[in-house]
């Protein structure tokens, strides 16, 4: 079946076009084009926007704004986003990172969406043509987004040096699909006591989720083998890992505490 491509100057215009049956937004295309190539007959029209704001990266007074069309490669090489380079480079190989976008990663189903895990740990705000929403609420409700709503960007506070940690576990290095991914933003006092923690997990549900029990257990402790023991024991609370060709739900849950401990102690 032939596919049409429609291009609009603004995200709002593109959103209006998405209300038509069979229309899907085309950003980098790493997900939607593959779906078309694999025979998804529900697709009939690709919709895209050339709005320059969608490609903009702005960092001001410690606050970053990434347009939805910003690619993983652009994030990985941006000097003011060095803390996030590891998370951006976790998305596929070089060819994929040159195409994969911030907006698309927010919609990627597990076991994909590693950068969305990082955005959840960063407590990002997602901006859309319909308003703004905290990333946690967006990820939980993305399947129910109103037709015609387009993600235009994300915003977050750039973490201080040493606060952000990211780990992706895969069977094939360096660009394999995730067994799991973990992102954490940790604030510590001068004596090394954790004063605040946000921990996000990928592949532990259909979308990235917070490890709230582990966060609670970690606050007030130090990142020593004994100090993190309670957090490691709690990190699997409430998870619902996926099963796919890469790993079973059982395996993912079993190895999560091991890799979480390595992330904290690295």
Image (spheres, rainbow, N blue to C red):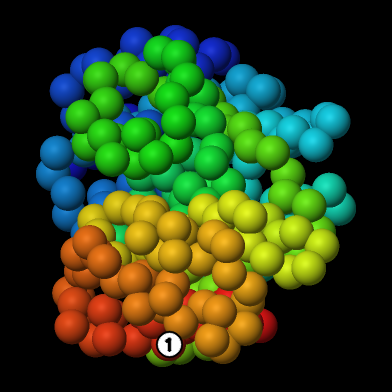
Residue located at (36% from left, 60% from top): 213
Q: Within the image, what quadrant is residue 68 found in?
A: top right
In the rendered image, residue 82, in percent from the top left (x then y), is placed at: 79, 58
Residue located at (49% from left, 39% from top): 103
Against 80, is 244 above or below?
Answer: below
Q: Within the image, what quadrant is residue 129 found in?
A: top left
Q: Is residue 24 left or right of residue 188?
A: left
Residue located at (42% from left, 76% from top): 230
In the rendered image, residue 64, in percent from the top left (x then y), is placed at: 72, 36
In the rendered image, residue 182, in percent from the top left (x then y), is placed at: 48, 68
Q: Is residue 155 left or right of residue 250?
A: right
Q: Is residue 86 visible?
A: yes
Q: Is residue 31 left or right of residue 156?
A: left
Quadrant for the N terminus in the image: top left
Q: Which residue is mark 1?
A: 258
Nearer-the-camera pick, 162 or 72: 162
Q: Secondary structure at mark 1?
A: helix
Nearer-the-camera pick, 83 or 73: 83
Against 44, is 147 above or below?
Answer: above
Residue located at (25% from left, 20% from top): 147
Against 106, is 194 above or below?
Answer: below
In the rendered image, residue 206, in percent from the top left (x then y), is placed at: 24, 56
Q: Is residue 57 left or right of residue 252?
A: right
Q: Is residue 48 visible?
A: no
Q: Within the image, what quadrant is residue 236 found in?
A: bottom left
Mark 1 neighbour density, 10 Å: few (under 14) some (14–19) many (20 or more): few
């Amino acid at each position: 079946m032939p596919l049409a491509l429609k291009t609009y100057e603004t995200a709002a215009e593109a959103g209006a076009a998405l209300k038509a049956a069979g229309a899907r937004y085309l950003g980098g295309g790493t997900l939607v084009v593959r779906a078309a190539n694999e025979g998804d007959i529900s697709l009939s029209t690709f919709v895209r926007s050339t709005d320059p704001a969608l490609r903009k990266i702005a960092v001001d007074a410690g606050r970053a704004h990434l347009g939805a069309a910003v690619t993983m490669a652009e994030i990985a090489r941006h000097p003011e986003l060095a803390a996030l380079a590891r998370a951006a480079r976790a998305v596929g190989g070089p060819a994929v990172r040159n195409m994969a976008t911030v907006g698309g990663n927010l919609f990627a189903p597990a076991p994909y969406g590693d950068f969305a895990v990082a955005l959840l740990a960063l407590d990002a705000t997602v901006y859309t043509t319909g308003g703004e929403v905290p990333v946690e609420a967006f990820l939980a409700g993305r399947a129910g987004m109103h037709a015609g709503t387009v993600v235009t960007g994300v915003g977050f506070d750039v973490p201080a040096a040493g606060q952000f940690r990211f780990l992706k576990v895969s069977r094939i290095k360096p660009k394999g699909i995730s067994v799991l991914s973990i992102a954490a933003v940790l604030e510590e006092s001068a004596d090394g006591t954790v004063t605040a923690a946000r921990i996000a997990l990928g592949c532990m549900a259909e979308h990235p989720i917070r490890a709230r029990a582990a966060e609670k257990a970690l606050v007030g402790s130090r990142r020593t083998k004994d100090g993190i023991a309670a957090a490691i024991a709690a990190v699997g609370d409430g998870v619902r890992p996926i099963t796919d060709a890469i790993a079973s739900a059982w395996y993912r849950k079993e190895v999560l505490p091991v890799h979480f401990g390595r992330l904290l102690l690295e």
